Amino acid sequence: MAVYTEIADEEVQEFARQYDIGRVVACKGIAEGIENSNYLLVTDTGPFILTLYERRVKVEDLPFFITLMEHLAARGIPCPVPVRGLDGRALRTLAGRCAAVVTFLRGMWPKRPHAAHCQALGEALARLHIAGQDFAMERHNDLSVGGWRTIYEALARLPGGVAPDLAAELLGELATLERHWPQALPTGVIHADLFPDNVFFEGERLSGLIDFYFACTDYLTYDIAVCINAWCFEVDGSFNVTKARRLIAGYRAMRPMLAEELQALPLLARGAALRFLLTRLYDWLNTPKNALVTRKNPTEYLQKLRFHRGARARRLRAG
Amino acid sequence: MAVYTEIADEEVQEFARQYDIGRVVACKGIAEGIENSNYLLVTDTGPFILTLYERRVKVEDLPFFITLMEHLAARGIPCPVPVRGLDGRALRTLAGRCAAVVTFLRGMWPKRPHAAHCQALGEALARLHIAGQDFAMERHNDLSVGGWRTIYEALARLPGGVAPDLAAELLGELATLERHWPQALPTGVIHADLFPDNVFFEGERLSGLIDFYFACTDYLTYDIAVCINAWCFEVDGSFNVTKARRLIAGYRAMRPMLAEELQALPLLARGAALRFLLTRLYDWLNTPKNALVTRKNPTEYLQKLRFHRGARARRLRAG
C-alpha cells in the first residue's frame, strides 16, 4: 500500500478536463498497489482509479501494460480499462509522473482466501491466458530464471550482504533451476503477480483482476506457479493441497494443460518461490527503515522455496 | 495519512449488514486522517467513510464526537454525519476497534490555500461556533494552556530529551502564556484542529469540514488562532497578512468578535503555536522511525512561535 506523490487539487481538476469523465468531486489517495500511487477519483459520472507511475515501472513499458488491459477488457476479462483522453491518449503527465485513469472495479480482495476463491482464480487465470493468445506485443520477463542470478549478485554486493548459509542455499537453487528450467512450454501473456490483493471478489464471484504492471511474456504455467505460492499456503506456512487442486482444476476446466506443463509445475513453483524470495530480500536490505512502504518479510518465501525443494526430494525418493 | 488496521472482506460485509446502507461493493483504505484508520466504503447506494478509532482517540470521548457531528450537521454545517445502525447505534466494534460509518463529503482539501479559501474558512468556522452554542455536551481541552506543562515535562523525560537552548525557550513561553492567558472569553465547541487537510473545497466553495476528533470546549477565538497558524503562513515561513485579514473578516462577517477577543488573538496564536510545537516535538522524539506514520517536522511551529513572540515585541516597542 502506498501513496507517494501528493497532487494539488487544481492539478487534478485540470488533468480531468482532458477526459470525458465529468467534473471531479473528490480525489483520495488509496492504500492499494505497492509500486505506484493510486487515487480514487470520484467524478459526477462515478468513481475511477487514477494511477501515477512511480520509480519501479519503466515508462517505456507503459504502452505494453495499457494496451494489454484494453486487449483483455475487450475480450471480457474483468480488468481495469484505461480511459482515453479527448486527444485519444491514455497516458499523460501529472505532478511530474506518467499517469493514467482506469475504470473502477467492484469487489474486495480476499484477506483469507478459501478453496472456492482458488477455483475461481484458476478459471480467471486460464481465461486471461486464452484472451492474451492473440495479443501482439511482447515483454521479456526480467524476473524469470534468466534474471535471478543478476538479482542475487546485486544482493550479495549490498552492505551487510547475505549470510553465508543463505548464500550457499540461494546459489544451489540458482544452479538447479538454471539447469532444469524447461526449454519450451506454451508461452503467452502472463500476469506474473496475481497475489490475493490483486484479485477482487464479490462474495465468491471473481469480479476483478488488477495491477498488470509485472505482466510479461513467459510460460503460462509459470503464472499458475506464482498463484499456487501466493494462494495455497496457510499463515502457518503449511501447504493446502485442496486449494492447489481446486486452483489447477479451475484452470484446466477453461484451458487444458499439456502433460509437460503439469510435469513442470513443481519446478516452476520452486522457481517462482525463488523469484519472490530474491526480490523481497533485495527490498528488505535496500529499503530505508523509515520509508512509507511496507517491506514484506522474505522469510515466508524462503519457507515456500524449501517446501518445494523438499517436495521434489520426496518425489525422487518415492519414484 | 494512515491505515493501521486491515479488515477482512467478510467482516466488512457482516458489519455493513447492521446498517441500512445497501450491499458493500468495495472497501479501500484511504490516506486520510492521522490518528485513525479510514476506509472508503462503497455500497450500491453510494460512498461512505468507515473509520476505525486507533490508539490516541479515547473511547469514552467518542459519544461526544459523534453527537457533535450530528448536532452540527442538523444545523447545516457541512460535516460528516454519523450513520446509525438498524439498532439505532452509531458506534460499534469492527476488527477489535471502535468503528463508525459517516457520510461521504465531496471536495478536495487545498494543497495551496489562497486568500479566498481563508475567507471561506473564516465564515465556516464562525458558523460552526454559532451552531455549537446550544450543544449540551462538554469536553475539556487537555491540549490547551493547562496541559502544556505536562507535555513539556513528558518531553523532557524522553531519552535524549530537549536541547538546553530549546528547553529554556519553551519554559519561558510556558511561563509567559500561563501568566497572560485570558481568564474569560466567549467559550463553546471548537474544532481545534482545522488544518487545510480537514477542509474540503469544490473550487473556492467550502464543501466540508472533517476530523472532529480534537473537538472540545474552549475559547472560540482559540480556534481562529489555530487556523491562522495553519493557513496564513507560506511555505518559506513568512506570515501572509492578507490571508489572516481575510480569514478574520470572513469570521466577523458571520459572528461579531468582542474587543477582548480581537485583543487576545495574538497571544492565543502564540499559544496555539506552542501547542502544536509541543505535540509535534513529542511525536518526533517518540515515534519509531519505521512507523507507517508521517512525523511532522516540529521546526515549522517553532518558527511560528517565534514569529508571534516577535510580533508582540514589535507591538510593545511601537506602543
Image: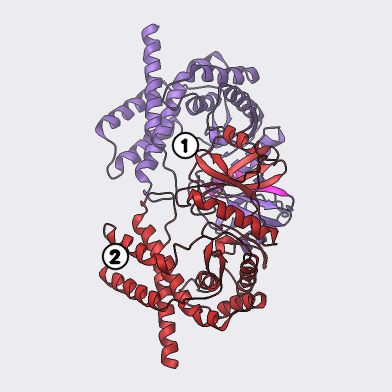
Chain colours: A purple, B red
In this view, the residue in front, A291 or B37, is B37
What is the x, y in percent for residue A157?
Answer: 30, 42
Q: Which residue appears at 65% of the width and 72% of the height?
A: B123
Q: Quadrant of the C terminus of chain A?
A: top left
The amino acid marked with disc number 2 is Val
According to the image, label 1 marks what residue? A142
**Residue A299 showing in the rendered view:** yes
Tell me the residue at 58%/45% (across/down).
Answer: B91
Confirm or deny contact between disc 1 and disc 2 (CB under 8 A): no
Question: Does residue A303 lie above or below A2 as drawn?
Answer: above
The reply, left or right, for residue A169 in relation to residue B198 is: left
The relative height of residue A227 versus residue A13 in the rendered view (above or below) is above
Q: Please give the name of the residue rendered at 40% of the width and 62% of the height, measured from the top-left corner.
A: B280
**Magenta region includes residue B129:** no
View extreme (front): residue: B136
> Dot 1 lies on which element?
loop
Q: Position of residue A254 (x, y in %)?
A: 65, 20
Label 2: chain?
Answer: B
Q: Position of residue A261 (x, y in %)?
A: 53, 18
How far is disc 1 from disc 2 in space, using C-alphas? 50 Å
The answer to whether B76 is drawn above or below residue A181 in the figure is below
**Quarter of the image holding residue A76?**
top right
Please name the residue that numbered disc 2 is placed on: B162
Residue A79 in sight from this viewpoint: no
Answer few, some or many: residues within 10 Å of disc 2's Cα (few below 14, many 20 plus, some between 14 and 19). Answer: some
Q: The magenta stretch spans which residues? A: A45-63
Q: Chain of mark 1?
A: A
- Confirm whether circles 1 and 2 share one chain: no
* Residue type at numbered disc 1: Asp
Q: Nearer the viewer, residue A183 or B189?
A: B189
